[in-house]
Amino acid sequence: MRALKGDAFDPKGLVAEAYNIDGITASECRTIFLDWALNLEGDTKEALTILIERHATGAHPMDGVLAEALKADAKPRRRGGWRSRERPPMPS
């Protein structure tokens, strides 16, 4: 069952297209995954589960990327930077 571009689980059809690219590398799959994750609205785990059921072949680099993301709860989050660190108290 192949999805059409623009469905709720693959809004831009990025994951579907990744599976159609011959010779795609795991690194390229991770880049595509990040773009997909940043544009997803809704439940990430549900979307990942659906995409794995829909596309996984067991022999494609995207299979590993999706499975790894499902284990790690893949919604990208900003982890903070220098401004998010607690500042030491000012000397008296």
Image: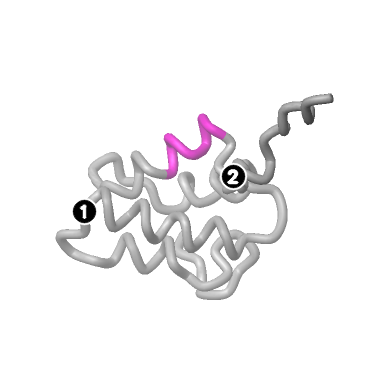
Give the structural element (helix, strand or loop) at label 2: loop
Please name the residue that numbered disc 1 is placed on.
25
Q: Residues within 10 Å of mark 1 (few under 14, many from 20)?
A: few
Q: Nearer the viewer, residue 75 or 81?
A: 81
Residue 65 on image: x %, y %? 38, 43
- Residue at image point 72% right, 33% down: 87
Residue 7 on image: x %, y %? 60, 69
Say which amino acid is labelled 1: Thr
Q: Quadrant of the C terminus?
A: top right
Q: CA distance from mark 1 to mark 2?
A: 30 Å
Residue 91 on image: x %, y %? 78, 26
Tell whether position 48 is magenta: no
Q: Nearer the viewer, mark 1 or mark 2?
A: 2
Sequence-first disc among 1 and 2: 1
Above or below, comparing residue 68 to residue 21 in the picture: above
Looking at the image, residue 69 sits to the left or right of residue 62; the answer is right
- Residue at image point 62% right, 60% down: 40
Location of residue 41 by image quarter: bottom right
Q: Nearer the viewer, residue 82 or 51?
A: 82
Say which amino acid is labelled 2: Gly
Q: Which residues are magenta?
A: 66-72
- Residue at image point 36% right, 51% down: 30
- Residue at image point 50% right, 66% down: 3
Give the structural element (helix, strand or loop) at label 1: loop
Looking at the image, residue 10 sits to the left or right of residue 91; the answer is left
Please name the residue that numbered disc 2 is placed on.
81
Instruction: Say which mark, if any, is on residue 58.
Output: none
For the image shown, how many numbered marks are present on the structure?
Answer: 2
Above or below, comparing residue 13 to residue 80 in the picture: below
Residue 74 on image: x %, y %? 55, 42
Looking at the image, residue 76 sits to the left or right of residue 20; the answer is right
